[in-house]
């Protein structure tokens, strides 16, 4: 028989011995100290990071940019979103057409050149009520102004949206949707006078020998063009001091308009660096032959030509991904480049 007070002391001594002999009940103070150090270092890092973000807005923007780039990246012609899903880019056609007018005054020996461009898009059903951002790149700063041609086009270059470069203009297209989906002009731009491209060279030479007046016309394509030119149309105005009916020309397929007094011919195409020369002969009118001093006649000329898959400037256009636009669809913009030249000498 054991006394009740003795039993209590017995069981308390037994419990203490069990606890002291069981290693599983022994706390690992060294492990706890390691975890505590980790928590302290994490709290210090978090607080320092928070302080940096509190005092610097650039840090927030750079982190947002990096996160956006990491969540969306391209693989071939496909876009991988933040969920790892592959989104195929929707093709859309954009055309960039430039027109150059070159006027050369032979009497004043002066030249005036102007270049203007037009941007067109071919709407598609996916473009309805879904924004498309186009970046108009101007690496040589040739653009003097941009004119928006439609109410659903906005120039958002001056918006709070961060611009990557100063030579970019961002156009936002909010197409309302139509049934015909015909190509539409969205904007035009005018280039500065400093832009002076030379896609073709036009030379004319006039020589008077007695009663005969000979005219030489030479057209040469700039070899630096990526492709040649096409639809070359030449109009040569004949002054009244020579007889148009007496014309002799070295090229076949020319036409003579007696009312407008114009000689015209067409070259279907000319390759880069190629030149074409045409010789024309006229008889001097009787009124001029009577005169003691025969002045050299002036033959104004107009040359028109087209270029494809090439431009007169370095201006380009591409899609601009806007990370602040959640509803934006990934588009693949295909740019069709072309130009037309009007070269006039008078």
Image (cartoon, rainbow, N blue to C red):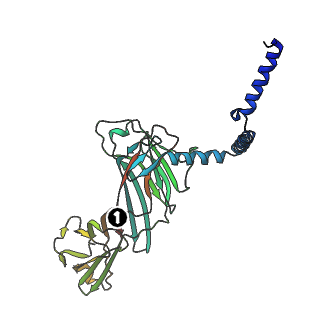
Q: Give the vertical position of 76 relative to 180 (above or below).
A: below
Q: Give the vertical position of 334 relative to 345 (above or below).
A: above
Q: Could you say where residue 179 lies in the image, as x and y percent from the top left? A: 29, 36
Q: Nearer the viewer, residue 322 or 238?
A: 322
**Residue 262 shows in the view:** no
**Residue 213 shows in the view:** yes
Q: Nearer the viewer, residue 111 or 150?
A: 150
Q: Residue at x 30, y 65 (%)?
A: 305
Q: Nearer the viewer, residue 293 or 166?
A: 166
Q: Is residue 269 left or right of residue 141?
A: left
How many other residues sit within 10 Å of disc 1, few (<14), some (14-19) or many (≥20)? Answer: some
Circle 1 SS class: strand
- What residue did someone put label 1 on? 342
On the rendered image, what quadrant is the C terminus found in?
bottom left
Q: Give the vertical position of 24 relative to 196 (above or below).
A: above
Q: Is residue 215 left or right of residue 331?
A: left
On the rendered image, what quadrant is the N terminus found in?
top right
Q: Residue at x 21, y 64 (%)?
A: 259
Q: Could you say where residue 247 lies in the image, as x and y percent from the top left? A: 19, 76
The answer to which quarter of the image holds residue 43 is top right
Considering every residue shown, the one lying at the far right of the view is 5
Q: Nearer the viewer, residue 94 or 258?
A: 94
Considering every residue shown, the one lying at the far front of the view is 1
Q: Residue at x 33, y 77 (%)?
A: 203
Q: Could you say where residue 32 lies in the image, as x and y percent from the top left? A: 73, 39
The answer to which quarter of the image holds residue 293 is bottom left
Q: Is residue 128 left or right of residue 71?
A: left
């Amino acid at each position: 028989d054991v006394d009740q007070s003795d039993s209590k002391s017995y069981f308390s001594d037994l419990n203490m011995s069990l606890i002291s002999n069981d290693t599983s009940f022994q706390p690992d103070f060294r492990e706890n100290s390691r975890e505590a150090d980790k928590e302290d270092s994490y709290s210090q890092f978090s607080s320092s990071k928070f302080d940096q973000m509190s005092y610097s807005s650039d840090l927030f923007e750079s982190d947002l940019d990096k996160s956006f780039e990491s969540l969306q990246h391209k693989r071939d012609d496909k876009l991988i979103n933040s969920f790892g899903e592959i989104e195929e880019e929707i093709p859309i056609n954009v055309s960039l057409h430039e027109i150059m007018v070159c006027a050369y005054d032979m009497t004043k020996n002066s030249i005036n050149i102007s270049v203007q461009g037009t941007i067109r898009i071919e709407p598609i059903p996916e473009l309805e009520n879904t924004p498309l951002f186009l970046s108009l790149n101007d690496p040589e700063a040739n653009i003097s102004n941009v004119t928006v041609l439609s109410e659903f086009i906005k120039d958002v270059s001056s918006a709070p949206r961060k611009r990557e470069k100063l030579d970019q203009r961002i156009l936002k297209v909010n197409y309302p949707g139509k049934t015909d989906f015909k190509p539409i002009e969205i904007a035009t731009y005018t280039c500065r006078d400093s832009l002076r491209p030379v896609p073709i060279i036009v030379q004319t030479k006039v020589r008077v020998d007695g009663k005969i007046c000979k005219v030489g016309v030479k057209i040469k394509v700039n070899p630096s063009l990526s492709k040649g030119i096409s639809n070359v149309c030449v109009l040569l105005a004949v002054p009244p001091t020579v007889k148009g009916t007496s014309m002799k020309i070295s090229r076949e397929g020319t036409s003579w308009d007696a009312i407008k007094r114009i000689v015209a011919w067409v070259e279907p195409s000319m390759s880069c660096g190629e030149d074409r020369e045409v010789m024309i002969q006229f008889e001097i009118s009787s009124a001029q032959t009577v005169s003691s001093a025969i002045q050299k006649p002036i033959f104004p000329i107009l040359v028109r030509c087209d270029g494809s898959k090439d431009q007169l400037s370095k201006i380009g256009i591409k899609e601009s991904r806007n990370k602040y636009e959640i509803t934006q669809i990934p588009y693949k913009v295909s740019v069709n480049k072309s130009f037309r030249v009007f070269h006039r000498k008078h």
